[in-house]
Amino acid sequence: MKIKTIILSCFGFIFLAMGAIGILLPIWPTTPFVILAVACFSATPRIKAWIMRIPFFREHIENYQRRNGLSQKTFWQSIAWLWGMLLISILAIRTPAIYIILPIIGIAVTVHLIFMAKPKED
């Protein structure tokens, strides 16, 4: 195995882990990291095929490649996680600045998700 392939694979796993973190953290992006991971794994088709067998990651990658946007299910799950985690964070931290900052972040991410959910025209 070439050193370039090893380095790309290491970065791929790092990006994949960062994408997985985005499943739990509402302000952490998932799709860009998963797409970067797949790009890094393009030198190792076996790892790329393994990632494509994971439904969550496959959906993000295929929707990005086909420019389909997000499914309704993914959109609403994302919104529910986003606002649920933000609410938990607000209640847990109880700092006046958090009462302002997190809702602003939530609104910005919600707007971003609305635009991501729309299919793209060529």
Image: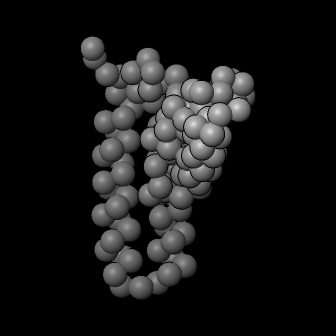
Residue 33 position within the rendered picture, expressed as x and y whole percent measured from the top left:
50, 44
Between 85 and 15, the one nearer to me in the picture: 15
Visible residue check, residue 55: no
Residue 67 position within the rendered picture, expressed as x and y whole percent measured from the top left:
39, 21
Name the residue located 44 percent from the left edge and 57 percent from the top edge.
Answer: 27
Residue 91 position within the rendered picture, expressed as x and y whole percent measured from the top left:
51, 77
Left or right: 92, with 106 as reference point? right
Name the residue located 34 percent from the left edge and 61 percent from the top edge.
Answer: 105
Q: In which quarter of the image is the N terminus?
A: top right
Between 40 and 51, the one nearer to me in the picture: 40
Residue farthest bottom in this picture: 95
Residue farthest front in this picture: 2
Q: Quadrant of the C terminus?
A: top left
Name the residue located 60 percent from the left edge and 44 percent from the top edge.
Answer: 7
Name the residue located 36 percent from the left edge and 35 percent from the top edge.
Answer: 116
Between 11 and 106, the one nearer to me in the picture: 11
Instruction: Check the image and report above or below for 47 versus 36.
Output: above
Visible residue check, residue 106: yes
Residue farthest left in this picture: 122
Task: Quadrant for residue 25, please give it.
Answer: bottom right
Left or right: 20, with 60 as reference point? right
Task: Quadrant for residue 34, please give it.
Answer: top right
Left or right: 55, with 97 as reference point? right
Colour option used: one colour
Q: How many labels does the image show?
A: 0
